[in-house]
Structures are given as structure tokens and as C-alpha cells.
Amino acid sequence: MIPYCADNFASIERMAISLVDVKRVAHLARLEIDPAEAEQACERLRGIFGLIEAMQAVPTDGVEPMAHAQEMALRLRADQVTEADGRELFQAIAPQVEDGLYLVPKVIE
Amino acid sequence: MEWETVIGLETHAQLSTRSKIFSGASTAFGAAPNTQACAVDLALPGVLPVMNRGAVERALRFGLAVGATINARSVFARKNYFYPDLPKGYQISQYELPIVAGGSLRIVIGDREKIVHLTRAHLEEDAGKSLHEDFHGMSGIDLNRAGTPLLEIVSEPEMRSAEEAVAYAKALHALVRWIDICDGNMQEGSFRCDANVSVRPLGSDKLGTRCEIKNLNSFRFLERAIDFEVRRQIEVIEDGGHIVLETRLYDPDRDETRSMRSKEEAHDYRYFPDPDLPPLVVSEAWREAVRAALPELPAAMCERFINDYGVSEYDARLLISSRDFASYFEAAAQRLIELNPAQLGNEEEARRNYGLAIAKGMSGLLAAQLNRAELDIAHAPVSAAQFAVLHARMIQEVVTSKSAREILLALWESPQTDESAIDAIIEAKGLKQVGDADELGGIVDGVLAANARQVADYRSGKEKAFNSLVGQVMKATGGKANPKLVQEILKRKLEG
């Protein structure tokens, strides 16, 4: 069973999305959002949740939840090294490199 | 108040595939930075992951080895977080439906056994590496490790002490190497543990708030980190405080754990099924083929060694410390049975006698020499067949055990592949046991004449003097005299 959808939708039904939720999700996704945009996003999301609520009315008892839109199994490849070193090519478009490393603003936890 | 410690471990075993889990880049350790990071590992636009069959097969081997359920259908999910060494902004992992569910592992703590249950094991990709030094205020990113296949093995919170946690980690470490899915190299990070630690009043059945200690890459650090963390938590609670659910890092230099991040916000990973990857389907035929190809597992082999070769449980555990050690034992025992130096008629008797001789020789002579040379048995310069011949010559009383050691060392110094090397060394070094009664009689006479005091002591009832005389005779023959014969002749001459 995959309770992703079922769980999330059930909780949505119980509580309407608030501005606080929108701001939190925006922060998690590292999106900068001003108050006007947040209001707007909140409205739109409520609309989407309305659609979901309508879909919740469809009886789905005994239907196995989907994990993918297509009814197919994962394709597998043989365990072989097929990629040659392409560092020079890839690093040509990097903003900053040194000693073969990509340089990024310092992040320490 | 009496406290009980509760520990669960999450272990990341790097799977020993040649290529990455979702790309064809190499996983070899130690390459120059970013030379093994292809477009998929770098998350360039337009690329798609393609699953490595070798990684799935290794996960199946593990699941079957621990008696777990193999989920015929499992699902890959995106675990979303931002960090520079994770170019996609998410890690591909498994969440609700892992490939392996349940299972258990038998661990040994001193002379006590315990079964630890597993929650699950799932496939996921590793992240890259961040280097925070020496880049004028920037961090350097090496993505060679990004996309390396990992099996995350999660135990139930069933360990009750650091000692049990270490025993579990060691048993798991031995198993993944035994079934050949992970090289187990802890220095290179191929096998690393996170420990979930909490405490509760003894007798309580409610779990306390836990802390997760990250990235413990040695058994010693695992033990010390848990010990510290348990003391810390008890102190906080006894001082009237509360434990906060958080991730902590162990600092081996200061021997303490410290807070890394609180779990409240940072851990909202917003998992969802990865639309790039349809469900992984494992057919019954594939599962059974993998099961059939599994080697005999350590627990079964341990039991068989005890039953078939009559070795003690202690020795059997030593013999199964690695698959190489176990196969060396069986190869040597088999060869000795073929040689049948004691001309035993009964097959069972032969197996028991010779098995025991080899087991003793391996736990004594060979293990000592391997330790001294810091060598793995796979690289021992003395082959199993040669080891068998060496024991045959001891059993036939061609050489003494003292000489056997000398032969082993000689072969160690200048290795040869043929098993006839043993006899050649005996010949070349003149190590053949002196078993001729006349020759020994002469030597004994000489020793008795030169040690009149010990002779007198012995005759006046001091039994200890006898051993000293045996020692003198052995010394006079360079350790080559048949010890039994020496005792016989000495006794006869002293009493006669």
C-alpha cells in the first residue's frame, strides 16, 4: 500500500490551507515569496484542494494506489561502466572551479 | 533511578557495483575529483535515471540472507532537501515501499546470543562530498560519490547497550562481506552507522525521545558515542530537563556528541514517488535464482563445522569470521582427510580428527602469524594444501610441532605454490624428527652425564627435574626429537 496520497488528502479535507502553510512550503522549497504573492498562491492552492476534495468522493475501496502514471515496471540496465570522464566538458560551464572541484558559497551545518 | 538504554541502528552499506545506481559512471574509490561524475550525477537538464540491475541483485542477496520479505513491487521516492553536494535537490530513495522488509540477525555478546530484528532495507543513492577548507571562503564539491548505490539497513530499537550495538554492527559488517555485496571498508566510508539512542526508566515500555548520532565510521566511535550520549541524556533528565529530538554529531577528538540540527523543520523531506522511475518489480523467478546462488551462510556453516568436524563452538565462530577463513579451513581439512596420515578407517572419525587438527592449527599457529604480518588469510603465503601437508607430517611424527612452526615461517619468507614445498623444506633444513631409539639413547646418555644434579634431584623424588631433563634433550636435538620417545627413554634410563 502507498498511503502518500490517501494520507495527505485526508488531512487536507480536515484543514484548509493557511498563509502559514504557504510560507512554510515556500521556505522549504527555497522560494522567495512576498505577502501579496503568498495570498495569491494561497487562493490558487485552495482551488486545487477543492478539486482534490471532489475526487475524494469517488469510491476507491479495494483499488491499489498508483505509484506511477504508467502501468509499467522499472527497466534495468547491466552493471557496466559506460561513462568516460567528461570533467573538462562539464566544468566549462561551471561558474567557478578549482583543483577539479566545483566551488560554491560555503555551507556548513 | 535505574535507566534502560534503547538503541536502533541505521547502517549505510555501499554496494559493490562497478557502476552507479542510476548512471554508467564508475564507482571506483580514490579517483581525481569529478572525473567519475557524469551528466546524470550532475543533474544536468534532460537526463533520466536508469536503474542498475547489480544494485537490485545485491539488495535481494541481503534480504534473503536475513530471512526478510522481498517486496515483489517496491517504489522509489524523492527525498527533498537542499545541499550543494546534492545537485538534483533531492535524493532518490525508497520510502513507503522498500525492497526488503523485516528479517533478523543473530548477534553474539560474549557468550550470550541475541536476535535483533530488522525493520527494513532500502536502496538509495549517495550524495557527493563537500570540502570546506582552503577555498578562499568557498566550499569545494566533488561529485564522484554522488549516485553511488547504498543499501540502508534499519534495525528495530532492540539493542540495550553500546556493547550490543557494536555486536550488531559487527555481525552486519561480517554478513555484507560474506554475501559479497559490500567491501566493508570503513575508512573509505563503505560501511557507516547512524545510531538512534534514547533512555527510559527501567521497566517502562514507552520509548523515550531519541537523538540520532550521525556518521559513525568505526566500531570504537560507535561504542564511545553511544556511551557519551546515554550519560548526557540521563544527566539532562535527572536535572529536570527534556531531551530534544535532534541529530547529533560525534566528535572523536573531544569524545562527545553535539547538536547538528533540530529535527522540527529541517526534516520535512516532502517525500513523493519519483515520476522518473516506475515501480521496481522483482519476479519470483529472479528472487529464487538469487536465493539459489547465495553462499552457505555463516550461521549454517558454524553449525555444520561443529557437527561434522567436532570443533568447539568457540573455534567454529573463529573459523567463520570471514568466508575466506572458512574456505581455507574446509580446503585444508579436506586435503588432510585425503592424505589420511593416521590411516583412519572410519570416515566420520577422520573428519573429526583432521578437522580438529586444522582448526587448532588455524586458531593458533596460522592466526598468530597472520596477525603478526597484518595479512588477510586470502593473501597468506601458505596455501590450504600446504597447511594440510604440514599437519600430516606432524601427525605422522615426521616433524615436531616446534619444527612445524619453523617450516611455516620458512614458507612464509619464500612462498612456493606446490604442496611438496613442505617436504622440501623439512629435507633442506634437516628438520626430520629424531625418532631413532638408538640415536636418541646416545643423546640421552650425554644429557644425563652432564646434568648429574637434576638426575639426583629426580631420584630423590623431585618430579620437576624430569621436565628439565626432557628440555635438555630437546635442546640437544634442536627441537627435533620425538617428545614421546624422549620421555620413554629418559624414564627407562633414570629408573633402570
Image: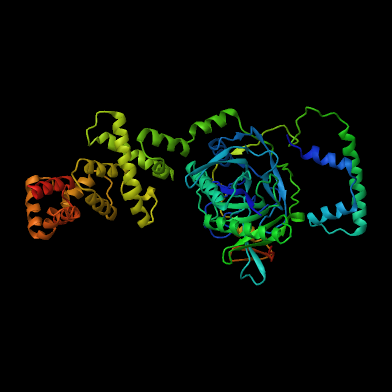
Q: How many marks?
A: 0
Q: Residue furthest bottom?
A: B136
Q: Residue at x 22, y 43 (%)?
A: B393
Q: Closer to the camera, B43 or B448? A: B448
Q: Closer to the camera, B170 or B450? A: B450
Residue A14 place in picture, x, y as percent:
88, 41
Q: Residue at x 68, y 64 (%)?
A: A108
Q: Residue furthest front?
A: B460
Q: Closer to the camera, B120 or A5? A: B120
Q: Residue at x 20, y 54 (%)?
A: B464
Residue A33 place in picture, x, y as percent:
86, 58
Determine whether, in the image, residue A61 is placed left or right of residue B83: right
Quarter occupied by residue B472 = bottom left
Residue B299 place in picture, x, y as percent:
47, 38
Determine whether, in the image, residue B446 is placed left or right of residue B293: left
User: For the N terminus of chain B, which image quadrant?
Assistant: bottom right
A58, above or below B105, in the image = above
Determine whether, in the image, residue B368 is placed left or right of residue B491: right
Q: Closer to the camera, A52 or B410? A: B410
State whether residue B128 appears in this view: no
B309, above or below B250, in the image = above
Determine whether, in the image, residue B125 is placed left or right of residue B360: right
